[in-house]
Amino acid sequence: MKDQVEIPVRTRLAMFVRLLAIQGAWNYETLLGNGIGFCVEPALRLLPGGQEGPAYRAALARQSQYFNAHPYMASVAVGALARAELDGEAPARIDRFRTALCGPLGSVGDQLVWAAWLPACSLAALAAFGFGVGTGGVIFVFLGIYNAGHIALRAWGLSAGLDHGMRVASALGGPVLRRGPRHLAQAAALIGGIALPLALDQVIGPGRALFGIVLGAVALGGFVLARLHGRAEGWKIAIGLLALFVLYSVVR
Amino acid sequence: MTDFVQLLPLAVLGAVLGLDVVSFPQAMISRPLVAATAAATLLGDPARGLLVGATLEMFALETLPFGASRYPEWGSAAVVGGGLFAMHGDGSPGALTIAVLAGLVCAWIGGWSMVQLRKLNARFARARHDAVASGSKRVVEGLQVFGLTADLVRGGALTAIILALFTPMQTWVLGAWGSDPRVSRAVVVGVAASVAGGAVWKVVHAAPAARWLLLGGIGVGLALLAAQ
């Protein structure tokens, strides 16, 4: 069995920092592709011939083509693709592996982060606000919890990719990625239920005299928007409603 | 006339937080709770920033920024909302309504501007396709730097333009505001919480027992309020 190329800590750190800017050149044609090349590049300098050698240039060109994934989960791809290049896998095999990674890393990341972790953290911060926690505390709750998960996910992804290379699929079957979104959604439901009335009470200020009416309107409005799921966006409807209210308030 | 000294730091903040939404580092410092508080802190009133930030956060709960979909840009939007609300610390009854409306309008235009930026990035990349295909490190890194810089400029310009438009408009509207302070606040909070309620349901409805957990949570929240 061939010895694996050792990746220095400095190179791993460079890759991790670059991961934070992986979507810097995001576009509708290559999507995340250039970002993958950008993040893998520090590792490619370890290829035979060094930086700007033929192997380096061929690998960088390969890794900068079209790619799509969740930006945090793309760390798994960056690590695994860097390992595959350093292990000297055949280019055609790397291309097939690269294509196969797109779907799972997109859907797992979307479900875990955008549809579960982010709303859960946002609702936890709104709950803290509703409980009367001060400005610094609310910000700390949100940024602290969210980024603990965010940074850990990126770091784990890079490490798992570098360790497992083209066998990284086994790491994607872990319980956090499989069952995490469901448990987080359940936590978000409970926290959201507690947070919304408390946050509403904090923001309503002088309107507290109308709290009962507002609560009834919110229940009705929330129900209608939930029924319209996918057919209308609440924030766009809100622009119309608030603009009408401003107009009414000015002309009356 | 908008005070340039006030506008400049807010535009810089809008640029940095607009960048966080997608390009760098996606640490969610661009979420309304954080961004509006930061903007108002620059103007010396973080508590008002947190208030408008919490209101805008209720709208932002609805946004699931999946891949290539078009979605509102909350970073610059929350800087606009937080800045406008902090500028009127005199308790004007319609100040929160105007700040939230300006934030929502900015979020909408911000979403459009991100689409334009992505098209610009594509044009820029297409013109350098051969260099990328030959494995040029300079070009690959250059594309990243170009995209990051363009996004920074986008967020700053958007924040500055919306603030320059809305600041005088806000002064005029608040001078003519005729609605009761209680109703003014109740309307904006009611709309925000309705959107948040629908959004929470959208996020959690597929999870087992989510319905009962949500109802239980609401019960706990209301009981806590009643006990106060």
Image: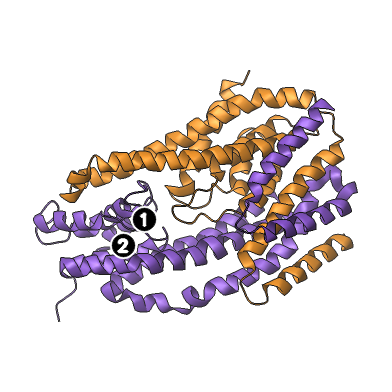
Chain colours: A purple, B orange
| Dot 1 crowding, Cα within 10 Å, few <14, some 14–19, many 20+ | many
**Count of number-bearing discs:** 2
Q: Which residue is mark 1?
A: A19
Between B105 and B3, the one nearer to me in the picture: B105
Residue B74 tag number? none
Q: Is residue A7 visible?
A: no
Q: Is residue A184 above or below residue B121?
A: below
* Depicted B108 relative to depicted A233: above or below: above
Residue shown at 54% from the left, 60% from the top: A146
Among numbered discs 1 and 2, the one appearing first in the sequence:
1
Q: Quadrant of residue A104?
A: bottom left
Taking the spot 28% from the left edge, 43% from the top edge, the residue there is B125
Residue A78's disc is: 2
Residue A236 coordinates in the image, percent (x, y):
64, 45
Where residue A38 sits: x, y (%)? 28, 52
Give percent across and percent down for residue B198: 69, 58
Q: Residue furthest bottom?
A: A1
Taking the image as shown, residue B79 lies to the left or right of residue A18, namely right
Q: In the image, residue A179 lies at what x, y percent?
A: 52, 77
Q: Quadrant of residue A95?
A: bottom left
Q: CA distance from mark 1 to mark 2?
A: 8 Å
- Residue found at x 28% / y 62%: A9
Q: Nearer the viewer, residue A189 or A100?
A: A100
Q: Can the viewer see residue A161 in this picture?
A: yes
Answer with left or right where residue B92 lies relative to residue B7.
right
**Mark 1 falls on what kind of element?**
helix
Task: Tell me which corner region of the image, top left, top right, bottom left or bottom right, holds residue B211.
Answer: bottom right
